[in-house]
Amino acid sequence: MLPLLIVLDGNNALATALREEGGWQIAACELRHFPDGETYLRVQDDCRDRDVVIQCGLQRPDQITLPLLFCIETLRELGARRIGLIAPYLAYMRQDVRFHAGEAVTSRIFAKLLSAHVDWLLTVDPHLHRYHSLDEIYAIPSQVLSAMPLVAQWIAQHIEKPLLIGPDSESAQWVAAVARRAGVPHLVLEKKRRGDRDVQVSVPSVEQWRTHTPVLIDDIISTGHTLLETIGHLRRAGLRAPVCIGVHGLFAEDAFEKLQQGGAARIITTNSVPHPSNAIDLSELLVTAVSQWLATSH
């Protein structure tokens, strides 16, 4: 029997694509808040003896985590067989070490919390920096999918003579993977971060690339400060206006508008987080992975 899909993150476009791609039934789930801010949640479809997949991007983790946990435990009480979580964007991966005495290593705490409630986890290009895999912090079966083949496909279809550029060393893995698939050149820049909003980027000699279209690739576009700094350097170096591609478009602090005004020719993201910039669809990738997982875990 096909799994039920419950959508908690409001990403209805992705949910519709998952339903159409996988033939899944979207279960009705009422989620709202009382005047005092507490959560009301009601699962309105029969989930007894069914596998249930919850679609819940965690781009607003402090707002959605409690409703997510309420939903999981309600499904268990109603007799759901297994409960999996599709979190296209996985939050709380930034703080992976205690940099200063007394800091909370929130990645480990959040992983422990989710692991205690959900049966399995599926995500896309999480920000693995000091961790080699999610298994280091998650105690449940997990699978990491990569959007980079889809990014490479989009670039091949839409951009002539691309030059792929990673704004920092952390983006090197994604840029190199896309460049290999697309068979195009790439550069990785050096970034010095002095604070959450204070970033300096150094750009190497780029004279030989003046006839190419720069394509900036990163896993997460949050405040956009790194990309803005890079765009400024590329413009001063005489390169064309770049295309900016992010797997997860969080766009904090009006970042999308700032990138548009700052000289980006186009801004592209996957539909992991709903936004007008979504142009790369993850639904087939997600449905295939969930179907394979369910088939092999019965």
Image: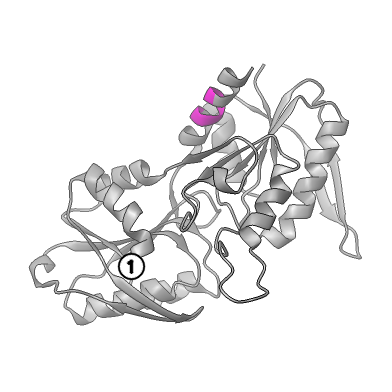
Position of residue 129 measured from the top left corner of the image (x, y, whole percent): 46, 58
User: In which quadrant is the C terminus drawn?
Assistant: top right
- Residue at 56% x, 47% y is 136
Q: Which of 42 and 70 lies nearest the eye of the viewer?
A: 70
Position of residue 25 measured from the top left corner of the image (x, y, whole percent): 67, 27
Secondary structure at badge 1 equals loop
Where are the magenta residues, as a range? 288-292
Residue 77 within the segment the image draws in magenta: no
Residue bearing the label numbered 1: 167
On the rendered structure, is 204 left or right of 78? left
Furthest residue in direction left, as rendered: 208
Position of residue 134 measured from the top left corner of the image (x, y, whole percent): 54, 46
On the rendered structure, is 97 left or right of 36? left
Place residue 12 in its image quadrant.
Answer: top right
Identify the amino acid type marked 1.
Answer: Pro
- Residue at 47% x, 69% y is 256
Dominant SS type (magenta) = helix
Position of residue 167 measured from the top left corner of the image (x, y, whole percent): 33, 67
Q: Is residue 43 visible?
A: no
Q: Which of 155 and 188 lies nearest the eye of the viewer?
A: 188
Place residue 139 in its image quadrant.
Answer: top right
The local crowd at label 1, few if under 14, some if 14 to 19, many if 20 or more residues have their Cα within 10 Å, is many
- Residue at 56% x, 58% y is 93
Vertical order, 29 against 225 (above or below): above
User: In which quadrant is the N terminus drawn?
Assistant: top right
